[in-house]
Amino acid sequence: MTQLAPFRLPEAPVETDLVAKYFRALGDPTRLRILELLRAEGELPVGALVGRLGLSQPNVSNHLACLRWCGFVDTRREHRTVHYRIADGRVDELIALAHALLADNEEHVAACCRVPAAATRSSKEV
């Protein structure tokens, strides 16, 4: 069975289309929170992520599928439990770089009216 990609691209995407799509996966606060948890705690099973995020298992699994599809996370199966981890050290570097850039531009990002803020946030912060 062929797995469908979570986002659609033009018939002949150029590299900027692909990079934008790649960053779109990081544009969701829940996916970033998942990556932050995996960066901080290492490998975690879905149940632990569900508990730490305070979200439903299907919701977390959906976000993990997106992150896995795009190569941000990888899995390891141990009996019936699937453990998730950062797939590549460069993902960690990318997020660390984003934090460093934000530190220099936080007021401008917070005040920006052109990029919409996240629609909803869980009351349980990471």
Image (tube, grey):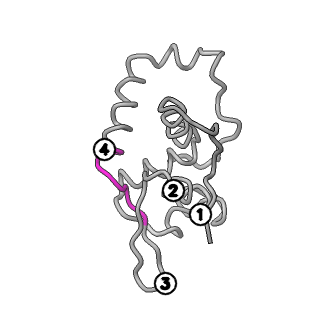
The mark nearer the N terminus, 2 or 4, is 2
The mark nearer the N terminus, 3 or 2, is 2
Measuring 56% from the left and 60% from the top, which residue is drawn there?
A: 65
* Magenta residue span: 84-92
Please check the rendered image and state whether residue 89 is part of the magenta-colored stretch, yes or no: yes
Mark 3 vs mark 4: in front: 4
Residue 95 versus residue 40 in the image, above or below: above
Reading the image, the residue beneath label 1 is 61
Q: Are marks 2 and 1 in contact (CB under 8 Å)?
A: no
Asked if residue 120 lies left or right of residue 81, the reply is right
Instruction: Look at the numbered disc 3 and give the secondary structure of its residue.
Output: loop
Which circle marks residue 90 in the picture?
A: 4
Of 126 and 10, nearer the camera is 10
The mark nearer the N terminus, 2 or 1, is 1
Measuring 65% from the left and 42% from the top, which residue is drawn there?
A: 121
Q: Amino acid at mark 4?
A: Arg
Q: CA distance from mark 3 to mark 4?
A: 29 Å
Whole-percent x and y of residue 95? 38, 38
